[in-house]
Image (cartoon, rainbow, N blue to C red):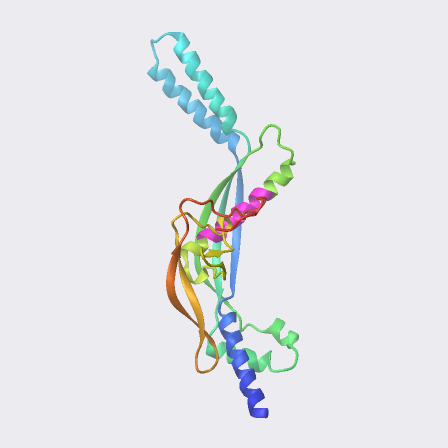
Amino acid sequence: MDQAASAAQSTDFLMDFDLIGNTYTVFNKMTFYENEPVARMLRDKAKAEVAKTLAGKPEILLTKAYEKLDQAYEKMKVGYTVICNNYLYQLVWNDSIAQKAKLDIFNAPTVNMQAFNATDLFKMSFVGKSTVTSLVTFKIGETRTQDQIINLQVKRTLDNALAKLQKKYVQFRPVSPIASVGPVTAQIGLKEGVEKGQSFEILEQGFNKLGLPVWKSIGKVSVDKKKPIWDNTAGAEATTFD
């Protein structure tokens, strides 16, 4: 019985080992820029170019051109442009770190929190970065407050940041269970950056001699190009999967 219990504990620890190595942290640096100064600069520069082009032409042409540029300026000046830089880190985890963590911290019925808080055993390794941009605009007749609109756009920007990191770095890509077959569906959508025609691997779970899970690729599936993709972004009404 003791040997069986010991073997079970070892197997459980190895399974935890596999999961712990997939620990990630993302740092986001988000900067808001008012659209108005940029819109004004572009309008003024365009007016200067138009004035050169229409020099000597009827005044009415210049006036109409200026009116169109002013209309474009009024639309562009509203809100903010958000630039979000995202930095992906992965927990450094290997056999030696795992064994030391097990002996010093987890080798008891309860976690030794004092040792956990004091240890310098755990470190993060830089994987890579991405940059995403978005617009925050305020429409006439909008029922939400300015703070609500900004908060919603912040959530969507962070979703876009994670989706871009997932596409760029294979090890950070999500794994989602199949929700149904015929057709194959999964509960991922626009929030995860799913695009029409995009291809995904289908993985089947098996077990090795130690009883640990292993994954084998058994095929591929593509996102339907005709049907709409599930909009599970922040603030959207999620009703369908695709």
What is the residue that sits farthest to the top in this orientation?
58
Q: Is residue 54 left or right of residue 102?
A: left
Residue 110 on image: x %, y %? 66, 78
Q: Nearer the viewer, residue 196 or 153?
A: 196
Tell me the quarter of the picture where residue 78 sits. Answer: top right
Give the vertical position of 12 relative to 84 (above or below).
below
Residue 14 on image: x %, y %? 50, 78
Residue 187 on the magenta span = no
Q: Is residue 100 visible?
A: no
Q: Nearer the viewer, residue 79 or 191?
A: 191
Residue 155 on the magenta span = yes
Give the vertical position of 141 relative to 24 (above or below).
above
Q: How many marks?
A: 0
Residue 102 on image: x %, y %? 56, 80
Q: Is residue 143 left or right of residue 100?
A: right
Q: Nearer the viewer, residue 231 or 40?
A: 231
- At horizontal 47% and vertical 59% (from top left) the residue drawn is 174
Query: For the stretch drawn in magenta, what is the main secondary structure?
Result: helix
Residue 204 on image: x %, y %? 43, 68
Look at the image and tell me in which quarter the N terminus lies: bottom right
Magenta residues span: 152-164
- At horizontal 53% and vertical 83% (from top left) the residue drawn is 10
Q: Is residue 186 visible?
A: yes
